[in-house]
Image: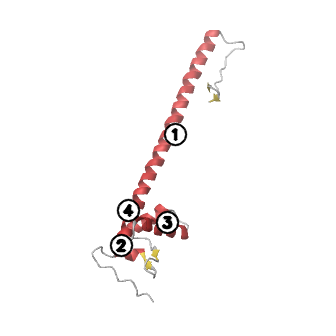
Amino acid sequence: MRLRDQVIGALNLFRATPGTFHSADVRIAQALADVATISLLHERSMRHSDTLNEQLQTALNNRVIIEQAKGKLAERLGLDMAQAFSLLRDYARDRNRRLVDVAQAFVDGTEPVTSRAAGKPRQLSQIADRSPRQPRPAPPPQT
């Protein structure tokens, strides 16, 4: 069973009595092998397509979570989106965790991510709990 130069599998034929196969039997066996080859290739293609679709959907879902966390951080800390992303990324790296896991935990309010944004560490969970309408504390005076 082949597709061009790629071997897909093999089809074994057995007879009840010793001897050679008739040419009609060989043609039927070849037709069965061709159908089986096409079926196997189709199944592989569908499995590959399903796997790729799952991976793309997971990547899209993860990106949405990361964007939510970036937006929440940017709003709470008064950062731009690049700074918010850097904060999340650095936190995940420092703790050897996946970015999407940290982002999800921050969005859920379960992750104690720290920020060194205003010169003093704060818990991102405290930032997450703060209402967006509350005024931000003034930065410490520079000495």
Question: Residue 100 or 15: which is nearer the viewer?
Answer: 100
Question: Which residue is rendered at x = 52% and y = 39% of the image?
Answer: 48
Q: Name the residue under label 1.
A: 48
Q: Which amino acid does label 4 sit on?
A: Gln
Q: Name the residue under label 2.
A: 76
Nearest to viewer (mark 1 / mark 2): 2
Mark 2 and 3 residues: CB-CB less than 8 Å, in contact?
no
Nearest to viewer (mark 1 / mark 4): 4
Sequence-first disc among 1 and 2 = 1
Sequence-first disc among 1 and 3 = 1
Residue at the outermost right position = 18
Q: Which amino acid does label 1 sit on?
A: His
96 versus 23 height, above or below: below
Under tag 1, what secondary structure?
A: helix
Sequence-first disc among 2 and 4 = 4
**Residue 27 badge:** none
> In the image, 142: left or right of 95?
left
Q: Mark 3 points at which residue?
A: 89
Sequence-first disc among 4 and 3 = 4
- Tell me if mark 3 has few (under 14), some (14-19) or many (20+) residues whose alpha carbon lies within 10 angstroms of its own: some
Q: Mark 4 points at which residue?
A: 68
Under tag 2, what secondary structure?
A: helix
